Amino acid sequence: MSVLVTGGAGYIGSVTVEQLIQAGEQVVVFDNLSQGHKKAVHPNATLVEGDLSDRTVIDAVFAEHNIDAVIHFAARSLVGQSMECPFLYLGDNVTNGLNLLESMTDHGVKKFILSSTANLFDDPENIPIDETERIVPGSPYGESKYILERMLYWLEKTQGLKYAALRYFNAAGASERFGENHDPETHLIPIVLQVALGQRDHIPIFGDDYETVDGTCVRDYVHVVDLAQAHILALNALGQGSRTYNLGSGQGFSVKQVIEAARKITGHPIPTEMGPKRPGDVATLIASSDKIRNELGWKTKYDDLHTIIETAWNWHKAHPNGYED
Ligand code: UDP
């Protein structure tokens, strides 16, 4: 199969490309490298540098490569930024996704996997959160992904598109070769590890009066290689119909618990500083992934937070300056 991976130079994209190639698939990566890195593109993948805002470039990719399926990672993905710059999300994320969907439809490509998000669940009635939970996007970022999910629903009805919407909880960890490198970095685990590497003085904690075990936000950290595997399973199952899955480990850890685990792994004291809440954050997000486990036999290889952070730590030690090394 030949798979077009938008955002394949980014964090989850690069690891998914690696897994696709290991599974014997042909991969074309489409990335504007605004957040991704050339060095994060697997050498056996073909890289096309381009922007999804440009329909002619996307059309050219479909015309030139015999694409069977699309996995769409390329998007802005920061909850906090989306509260400050909503149009980057309600605008760019949505129109770029629409361009891609229109172009692939025009070229007869009928298989699509969307990177969706746990930020659809701002006010969950039940935890762990399964796929029947009501949708309440928590930010313009979450809303942009929900709009794309709705487009997929209608394109299935009207165009015969087969899709999977995969709602990630918190991607974490690294493969041996590919890891998390954003600039600026905003995510908890890489920042904590930058403190351990001596690149920052402390980690700010965004609020400690949430209704959680210790007042800090609880998240479900799922290993990026396990997430990548879920994409491959979903891709191979599209022939049997469209589907939507929540992807997490089913366990929640508070910000303080993550920091404590990182102290044990790195041996660094990792100083903290209490700060205000980050707009758009939800107190607790834990996934129920029973549906994908039952339907597709998804098994997570990395089941405990310690191992997940350890794989990230190994990558960060080997790449202290990210892909700039
Ligand atoms: N967080 C924090 N300090 C930081 C970065 C993140 O306290 O410097 C918190 C954040 O408020 C959230 C959790 O850590 O509750 C995970 O945040 P991250 O940005 O990694 O992922 P998100 O949950 O936004 O997808």
Image (cartoon, rainbow, N blue to C red):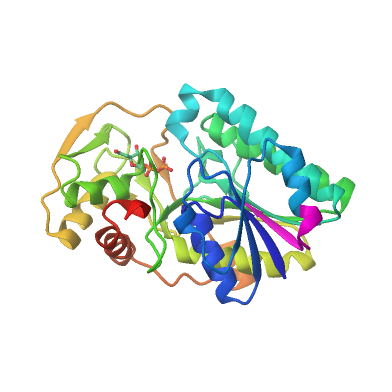
> Residue 21: x and y, percent?
58, 72
Left or right for 214, reference 121 = left
Left or right for 167, reference 323 = right
- Which one is nearer the viewer's eye here, 172 or 69? 69
Please identify the residue farthest to the right as the structure is shown.
158
> Residue 113: x and y, percent?
67, 55
Q: Is residue 295 visible?
A: no
Q: Quadrant of residue 191?
A: top left
- Which one is nearer the viewer's eye here, 6 or 191? 6
Which quadrant is home to the C terminus? Answer: bottom left
- Which one is nearer the viewer's eye here, 198 or 269? 198
Q: Which residue is found at the position 46% from the left and 58% from the top?
A: 40
Which quadrant is home to the N terminus? Answer: bottom right
Q: Which residue is found at the position 88% from the left and 49% from the top?
A: 159
User: Does residue 126 lie above or below 78 as drawn?
Assistant: below
Q: Quadrant of ligand 1?
A: top left
Left or right for 80, reference 53 = left
User: Does residue 226 lie above or below 153 as drawn?
Assistant: below
Q: How many marks?
A: 0
User: Does residue 55 lie above or below 13 as drawn?
Assistant: above
Magenta stretch, residue numbers: 62-72
- Reply yes or no: does residue 312 show up in magenta: no
- Which one is nearer the viewer's eye here, 109 or 65? 65
Q: Quadrant of residue 292?
A: bottom right
User: Does residue 217 lie above or below 236 as drawn?
Assistant: above
> Residue 266: x and y, percent?
17, 59
Q: Which residue is found at the position 45% from the left and 60% from the top?
A: 224
Left or right for 266, reference 63 = left
